[in-house]
Amino acid sequence: MYGGGYIGGEETLQTNQDDPIALAEFEARIAAGDKIEPKDWMPADYRKQLVRMIEQHAHSEVIGALPEGTWITRAPGFRRKLALMAKVQDEMGHAQLLYSAAETLGKSREAMINDLINGKSKYSNVFNYPAFTWADVAVIGWLVDGAAIVNQVANSKGSYGPYVRALERICYEESFHLKQGHDNVVFLATGTEMQRTMLQEALNRWWQPLMHFFGPSDTMSVHTEKLMRWKVKMASNDDMRQQFISMYVPKIWELGLTLPDNELKRNPLTGKWAFADPDWNLFFEVIKGNGPLNKERLAVRRTAEERGRWVREALLKADMKYTVPFA
Ligand code: FAQ
């Protein structure tokens, strides 16, 4: 029996939610490194936090397919087009895996999709920006995927079985995406003056959204403390940001590119990087729905949902045992 949580989008309270013995046993299992499975007892807030986080992650994969997706028809050359198509398909596959993991916690896929298109659920800030040129696609493939890997490799060691198994598989595919993004970046970085300029401009555009990607600084983060105690989140926002910077800044500089942050500097004694504090007001505006492309992104998904309705209904009438969310 579920230990309390969402059923069909409604939150239900189980009688033993406040049972201190059950909670102590649960926390002991987490501390011992056990995986929690869907039918195990769990505190209502653990369930709620997981639904929130996995659902936001799934939505990010769906919306994240859009900036690159618009470049499939314009990819320079057949091989790059094939690789990009495969990547975009993978991202949608990740969404499927993640929605399935969230469904094990009792929230229906339909309720999740509705919350996305109605603007009730969040998705990653980074996908509310335009991909003006092919260099934006290269930067997304290398650095947005690189940032996602930092986060997902950490969280794949977490406590909730269905989520960590989904993340393990996702990480394999993201590693391929990273290589295709890196290949595109190196090609442009070693190309003509015009290609290098195009790449540098894209990098300048994406740096701030990438700094925001890991979430608000630890002092502003609302959920980190509890999520880390329950091993849902395995590193804090600032630690993940620091890890990303230390992995990628040297590689970016090696290519002769610059970053729009004059404060970026590695402390040789601690190995830690100093960097300019990201503009958090801008971040909160973007995640509230006021970024450059939030409205357009949701409008695209809403249209896809409407246009695919007849397919879902036809499949249901054909007595299929599952629903097809993205026809
Ligand atoms: N964007 O208390 P915290 C990808 C919200 S997948 C939007 O620190 P938390 C693949 C947060 O929800 C990318 N909102 O939150 C790909 C909360 O608001 P709420 C997605 C954000 O959960 C690549 C509030 O701020 N990855 O890229 C963001 O402890 C290329 C307070 O924040 C995941 O979702 C943000 N960046 O830590 C696809 C991974 N950051 O809900 C296509 C799983 C924070 O209370 C192409 N998620 N907020 O209203 C996580 O690891 C965590 O949820 C964090 C945030 C680290 C994102």
Image: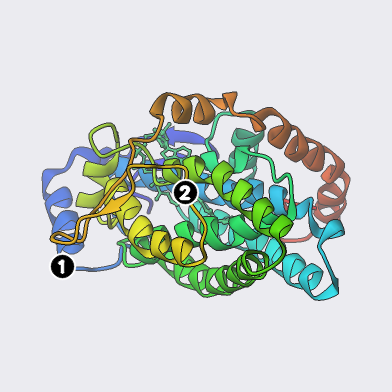
* Residue placed most toward the observer, 204 or 142: 204
Label 2 SS: loop
- Colour approach in the figure: rainbow
Disc 2 to disc 1, how far (Cα)? 42 Å
Q: Could you tell me which residue is drawn at 79 percent across and 50 percent down?
A: 70
Q: Give the side of residue 16 with respect to residue 61, left or right.
A: left
Question: In the image, what residue type sits under mark 1?
Answer: Ala
Q: Position of residue 289 (x, y in %)?
A: 57, 26
Q: Could you tell me which residue is drawn at 82 percent across and 65 percent down?
A: 76
Q: Is residue 38 visible?
A: no
The picture quadrant where one finds residue 100 is bottom right
Q: Give the side of residue 204 with respect to residue 297, left or right.
A: left
Label 1 SS: loop
In the image, is residue 125 above or below residue 135? above
Q: Give the side of residue 27 with respect to residue 147, left or right.
A: left
Q: Could you tell me which residue is drawn at 32 percent across and 40 percent down?
A: 14
* Residue placed most toward the observer, 131 or 268: 268
* Residue placed most toward the observer, 167 or 36: 167
In the image, farthest residue toward the front: 193
**Residue designated by label 2:** 259
Q: Could you tell me which residue is drawn at 36 percent across and 61 percent down?
A: 155
**Residue designated by label 1:** 32
Q: Position of residue 31 (x, y in %)?
A: 15, 62
Q: Quadrant of the N terminus?
A: bottom left
Of labels 2 and 1, earlier in sequence is 1
Question: In the image, what residue type sits under mark 2?
Answer: Leu
* Residue placed most toward the observer, 170 or 80: 80
The picture quadrant where one finds residue 117 is top right
The picture quadrant where one finds residue 15 is top left
Nearest to viewer (mark 2 / mark 1): 2
